[in-house]
Image: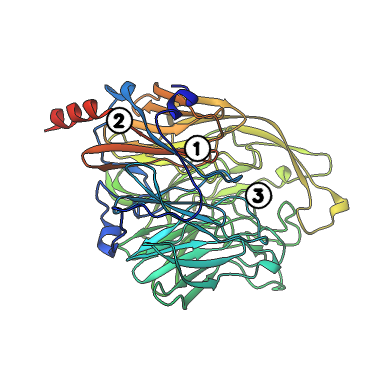
Amino acid sequence: MKLLKAASIFLVCGAASTFVSGAAAQSLTLDQIAHPSADSWPLYHGDYSGRRHSALTQITPANVNKLSLAWVFQTRQRSEIKSSPLLVDGILYFTVPDQVWAVDARSGHVIWHYNHPTTEGLHIGHRGVAVFKSWLYFVTPDAYLVSLDTKDGSVRWKKQIADVKKGYWTTLAPLIVHNHVIVGVSGDFDNLQGYLRSFDPETGDVQWQWESTSPAGTPNSTTGGMTWMTGTYDPDLNLIYWGTGNPTPVLNGKPRPGNDQWTCSIVALNPDTGKFVWGFQPSPHDTHDWDAVETPVLVDGDFHGKPRKMLMQASRNGYFFVLDRTNGQSLLTAPFGPVNWSQGVDAKGEPIPNPQKEPAPDGRLIAPDEGGMTNYRAPSFDPKTGLFIVDAHPSWSLYFAKPADGDYGWAGADYGVWGKAQIEAIDYQTGKIRWTHDAGAGGSGAGVLTTDSGLTVTGDATGNMLILDSRDGKTLWHAETGGSIESSPIAYELDGREYIVTSSGGLLFAWALPESSASSARTASR
């Protein structure tokens, strides 16, 4: 389907604050967050597990060729949509930096639009919002947490997360757990300490803070460890799981000897107190800018014949990890693409950095590149196939140390040599790649959604929305979108009709079967 032809079906343009009658936000309870219904997508990942898997089955491999465009929304902003919309009571909430929209999920009509103009902070992108009761929460480039009323977008309160003048900014979608709004910080300057902070959802008061690194100036320690992306949560264990970013200085490890804990790590914390429970380090003593903030996906199932509560992560450094999430012990560590920077894996399942692969004045050929084998784009776990499906980026790069830069700051450079985008399906029992789908030269920013009917929804490097067969990765359907796909898809069902929502550039697309086909699918499923 060509975009220009498809867009003629329905185009809605974002503008000033507008209200559409008949769509009124209601209260979202903790139980509705913990147990999402088919007509909701109440968290950034869809649910607490981070699996991004939908139980919907109306759109299938047999009828997906009939998929068409239900509506398109245009933000009219320069920023690309990198957020995952939330769906609550028939209303989609989504963002770009400084902007929040509430849009009718059936038609794409604007309900309200909030603008929070800032000039400070890095406007690199924005992941989305959180909703609890009738309150919405989002972070700003100048490092504030803002709460809006979901009915009309009016401001309830605004609280500082970090000091933008020190070099902090914020981009993530908050996580709601119990009576906590949990947010993290971003920033790559030296002497900045990474942390998570919990706010009271009603008052905005700070409840606790957990620091991933020591204060600046602590001997033989590092700064950094930013908490860029939204974590996950296990209600049974009452633990949140979060990834942390690289240490600083970024490419120079000499001023920060040792493993630099807890940078480039997966950590488990008590959400009520912020107390540290356990940590695992995918990239000890990182010197390649390989954050470990990729989604910590929670899966319950058998591992080698034994029931386990697992955590899985496809990490930026090129390794796929399976952990026991009760204690952080390693069950599996395996590369999911070219990796040449380690000397193997230690007894804890953590890679062993090779000192000869650190940036040097004459350059070092490293796989993967600085962008990593994957990045912020969300993976999906399909419980029916047992496959962990991720938008991967096999790549090679030349890393240089630059003595003229001194020991601090970036202190080096990375020059890409080769890379491509491919969708990979990883068998979590073995770490073996069961299938791959070529997604173009360079890299892709699209996340992944899977469904119970056997669909894998994602995008490629040239702006095509893709729907693949989850069993073998073969293309079932695609559509040109006319822009770069930098977000992760969602799915929901309203009035008996299943929708898949994707974005490209500043456009939000809602896809569905024609009503006649949707009706036939509903009848067949009874």
Q: Which amino acid type is shown beneath numbered disc 3?
A: Asp
Q: Amino acid at mark 1?
A: Ala
The answer to whether residue 235 is above or below residue 274 is above
Residues at marks 2 and 1, CA–CA distance in whole angstroms: 19 Å
Q: Which residue is mark 1?
A: 446
Is residue 230 depicted above or below 505 in this figure?
below
Between discs 3 and 1, the one toward the N terminus = 3
Give the camera-side residue of 273 and 170: 170
Among numbered discs 2 and 3, the one appearing first in the sequence = 3
Residue 473 vs residue 399, the one in the foreground = 473
Q: Give how far across and how far down residue 132 sits, in percent.
A: 35, 64
Q: Looking at this view, is 90 or 339 the one in front?
A: 90
What residue sits right under mark 3 in the picture? Answer: 289
Q: Is residue 195 left or right of residue 453?
A: right
Residue on which the image places disc 2: 454
Q: Earlier in the sequence, mark 2 or mark 1?
A: 1
Mark 2 lies on a secondary structure that is loop
Mark 3, residues whose alpha carbon is within 10 Å: few (<14), some, or many (≥20)? many
Q: Residue furthest left?
A: 526
Mark carried by residue 198: none
For marks 2 and 3, give the one nearer the viewer: 2
**Mark 2 and mark 1 residues within 8 Å of each other at the beta carbon:** no
Say whether residue 230 is left or right of residue 355.
left
The picture quadrant where one finds residue 116 is bottom right
